[in-house]
Amino acid sequence: MPHSVVCDAGGVLAAAGALEGEVLPDAELLALDWSSVTVGRFLAARHEGRAEIIQVETGLVLAVVDEWFPVRAMVAETLVRAGLDAVDALDSWSALVLAEQLELPLFTASDEVTSDRVEILRPW
């Protein structure tokens, strides 16, 4: 297992145990800051807007990430790579851009992203 991996929101949720699937043992998790918004949106939907549960679970899930990266530097490349129809997968595509820049694997729950430059790991 690689020492460091980049995660999109699905990877963060899987690593925290909030999504079913395999967890990465002993890996340093790196993520883009906007993945935290996607995680929050997922947990808000899951818990039907109950703020007290959302706040606790969001804190627990986001705590598994070792380092957060700002997304601003890769917005343009993400939009070019993802295409106009990838609105729901922009988090995953931007995480892939980061993974390729860092030359690290991507841990994702998305079936949409692919790369010939880095390994794609999925929780299933």
Image (spheres, helix red, strand yellow):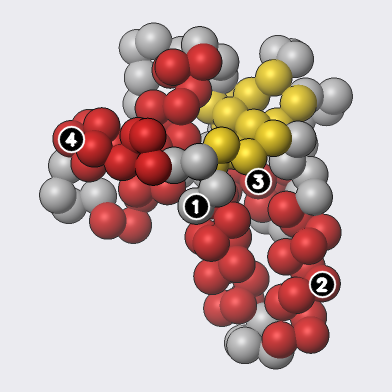
Mark 2 and mark 4: Cα distance apart in space: 36 Å
Q: Is residue 119 visible?
A: no
Q: Are marks 3 and 2 in contact (CB under 8 Å)?
A: no
Q: Which mark is residue 34?
A: 1
Helix, strand, or loop for circle 3? helix
What amino acid is labelled 2 in the image?
Answer: Val
Would residue 102 appear left or right of 79 to someone viewing this image?
right
Mark 1 to mark 3 CA distance (whole Å)? 12 Å
> In the rendered structure, which amino acid carries the disc numbered 3?
Val
Q: Are marks 2 and 1 in contact (CB under 8 Å)?
A: no
Foreground: disc 3 or disc 4: 4
Query: Looking at the image, is mark 1 or mark 3 earlier in the sequence?
Result: 3
Measure how far apart labels 3 and 2 are at the Cα level.
Answer: 15 Å
Q: Residue at x 34, y 57 (%)?
A: 88
Per the image, the residue denoted by label 3 is 12
Where residue 91 appears, as percent x and y from the top left, is 42, 47
Locate residue 107: give its quadrant: top right
| Residue 3 percent across, percent down from the top left | 75, 15
Q: Residues within 10 Å of mark 2 (few under 14, many from 20)?
A: few
Rounded to the nearest whole Å, what is the CA distance between mark 3 and mark 4? 24 Å
Q: CA distance from mark 2 to mark 1?
A: 19 Å
Q: Which residue is mark 2?
A: 56
- The amino acid pointed to by label 4 is Val
Verify CB contact (< 8 Å) between mark 2 and mark 4: no
2 or 1: tag closer to the N-terminus:
1
